[in-house]
Image: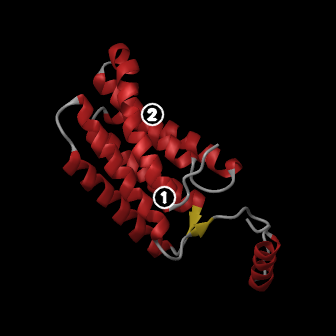
Amino acid sequence: MMRWDSFGRSAAFAAVAALAWIPWLVVIGPVAGPATARTLYLIAVSAAYVGGLGERIARRLPVAVLTAIAGCGLAVVGRDQTVLCLGLGVVLAVARSVFLYRSAPARAVMTEGTLIGGGLLFARLLTARSPLGTVLPIWGFFLVQSCFFLVAGVRERRADGGHPDPFEAAHARAMEVLERPIG
């Protein structure tokens, strides 16, 4: 399964997610209607984004499934695109900073608040009143989310059972780097 856990990969995901909206609308739109197609697409693309974050599939797959379930719940309860987008932003922030990546709690709240808020604002500025007007907002939102990987002090969450001693953990990481093949 592809990963987008770097700025470049995440920016590429933003472009692919934006362009994939058009075929989705062509296929799903006539069956479900444009509004429902958009709702389903936003949920699917959010879950796909979360599913590509992080290194281990055993951690990211359950979080992606939970993201999809939460998105469906938001779609049923909210019945409004604005509520859905805000809710999916919060779900993405929680998935990324609580389950997949680690940083200081205050830093995580500031980072996620800035990225989700900035992404939603940028998407709102790019919105147009047409079915194809959804392409740029999707691209804009996920492009802003790519900046997560430019923030210092963020690292992937490791499974429990790691070294309790920080020196041992640092030694293990150093040995891992030294033993990697070149090329």
* Image point (50%, 76%), residue name: 152
Nearest to the observer: residue 65 or residue 31: 31
Q: Is residue 163 left or right of residue 149?
A: right
**Which residue type carries mark 1?**
Gly
**Label 1 environment density (alpha carbons within 10 Å; few <14, some 14–19, many ≥20):** some
Given this view, does label 2 or label 1 mark the residue nearer the observer? 1
In the rendered structure, are the residues bearing label 2 and label 1 in contact, judged by CB atoms less than 8 Å apart? no
Left or right for 65, reference 26: right
Q: Is residue 5 above or below residue 169?
A: above
Q: Outermost residue, top direction?
A: 31
Where residue 107 sits in the image (x, y, percent)?
45, 74
The location of residue 172, given as percent across then percent down, is 80, 76
Front-most of residues 93 and 135: 135
- List the residue tagged with mark 2: 72
Q: Which x, y percent locates residue 73?
A: 44, 35
Type of amino acid at the residue the image marks with label 2: Cys
Residue 8: image tag? 1
- Residue extending furthest toward the left: 129
